[in-house]
Amino acid sequence: MAQAGTLHDAFMDELRDTYDAEKQLTKALPKMARAATNPELRTAFETHLEETRGHVERLEEVFASLEEKVRGKHCDGIAGIIDEGKTIMEEDFEESTMDACLIAAGQRAEHYEMAAYGTLVAWARVMGHEEAADLLQQTLDEEKAADEKLSLLAEEGINQGAADAAHPSDSEEDEEDVPKMPAPRSRGRGAAASARRASSR
Ligand SMILES: [Fe+2]
Ligand SMILES: [Fe+2]
């Protein structure tokens, strides 16, 4: 009878899965950066791309600290999240709406990584792999910071910009002295005269 797997086996499995997830993200993040129109959002994706390359290297250090061969195993979870992101980028969204959707897609990826690293840190600690746990904790901190940065960008203006584009009449109502005229009919001098009156104000 085959021996039952241990927590160490599950840990190695999770590590290989996460290694593959990080590699997939190094390919997805440049596309998200290119799709972003807000320059700060673009910079945030580019900065996190650099960090993500560091996460790949840090995981290689984790494998080395455990005297295990560096190996990845296809991560279906992040592949699904990246696919959803691709679908969003193919949509014909107005600029700030696209940025808001890219933030939503990016945060899904960060939360997935936070869950993975949270588990990896806890399992490494409980099994006494302190060096591995410390390395994994550094990445977990960077994932959390990246997630918070995306929240900040959304809350500091991108969401509002998208909301204004969705409900332009709300912001127009704030403008004073705009006469409420009936919609011009297709024919007749009345509409043209109204338009002239409006433009001369
Ligand atoms: Fe990462
Ligand atoms: Fe990340």
Image (cartoon, helix red, strand yellow):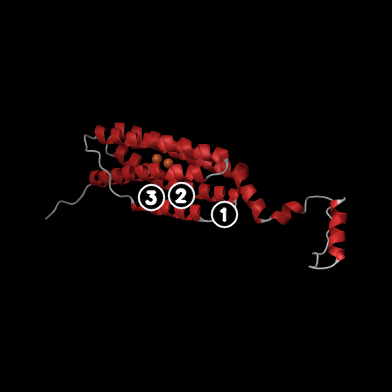
The verdict on label 2 being within 8 Å of ligand 2 is no
- Answer whether labels 2 and 3 touch (C-beta < 8 Å): no
Residue 151 visible in the displayed image: yes
Residue 119 visible in this rendered orientation of the protein: no
Q: Position of residue 153 (x, y in %)?
A: 57, 41
Instruction: Kindly identify which residue carries mark 3.
Output: 78
Observer-side mark, 2 or 1, equals: 1
Q: Is residue 8 above or below residue 90?
A: above
For the residues bearing labels 2 and 1, Cβ distance under 8 angstroms = no
Mark 2 — residue? 108
The residue closer to the viewer here, 154 or 82, is 82
Q: Position of residue 93 (x, y in %)?
A: 57, 54
The residue carrying pointer 2 sits among few (fewer than 14), some (14 to 19) or many (20 or more) residues within 10 Å by Cα, namely: some
Q: Considering depth in this image, is 43 or 92 the residue closer to the camera?
A: 92
Q: Which residue is mark 1?
A: 93
Q: Amino acid at mark 3?
A: Ile
The quadrant of the rendered image in which ligand 2 is seen is: top left
At label 2, which amino acid type do we have? Arg
